[in-house]
Amino acid sequence: MPGFKARPPAEPTILLDDAVVRVTRWDFVPGADTGHHVHGMGYVVVPMTDCKFLLEEEAGERRVDMARGQVYRREAGVAHNVVNGGTEFMSFIEIEYK
């Protein structure tokens, strides 16, 4: 089937979900993805490993490499699919604020 991509799913583990935040650990084998989604809340990402992100967005694909511990924040409304674009396992913590 042309254009079809079979990827393993990234594995989310909810670490905390209360009235203030939801904290999720995301684990990705090489090539794994989150599936396309829209963030309903603002969030902070903390890489637990070096990460080679392949971000599939409406405007196209882009690659972002982040070192372990390098933090970034985005507002609600972000729409994308996050893919492990590297050859090594990657993991990050996502903190969504309610």
Image: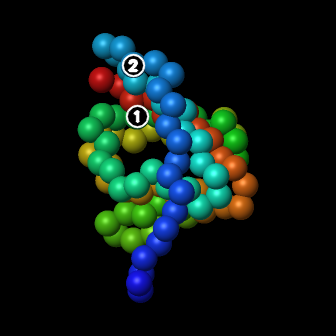
Query: Residue 68 at what x, y percent from top left?
Result: 69, 40
Mark 2 residue crowding within 10 angstroms, few (<14) / some (14–19) / many (20+): some
Q: Is residue 27 left or right of residue 43?
A: right
Q: Quadrant of residue 69?
A: top right
* Residue 27 in view here: yes
The residue that disc 1 covers is 43
The residue sitting at 31% across, 13% down in the picture is 19
| Nearest to viewer (mark 2 / mark 1) | 2
Q: Amino acid at mark 2?
A: Asp
Query: Residue 44 at what x, y percent from top left?
Result: 46, 34
Tell which residue pokes out farthest to the top in this image: 19
Residues at marks 2 and 1, CA–CA distance in whole angstroms: 13 Å
Q: At numbered mark 2, what does the secondary structure look like: helix, strand or loop?
A: strand
Q: Earlier in the sequence, mark 2 or mark 1?
A: 2
Vertically, is 32 above or below 10? below
Q: Is residue 26 left or right of residue 98?
A: right
Picture disc at residue 17? 2
Q: Quadrant of the C terminus?
A: top left
Q: At numbered mark 1, what does the secondary structure look like: helix, strand or loop?
A: strand
The residue sitting at 29% across, 48% down in the picture is 38
The residue sitting at 39% across, 29% down in the picture is 96
Q: Amino acid at mark 1?
A: Tyr
Query: Residue 63 at what x, y percent from top left?
Result: 55, 64
Query: Residue 91 at what x, y percent from top left?
Result: 62, 41
Question: Which of the pair 56/62 is nearer the observer?
Answer: 56
Picture disc at residue 63? none
The residue sitting at 42% across, 76% down in the picture is 4
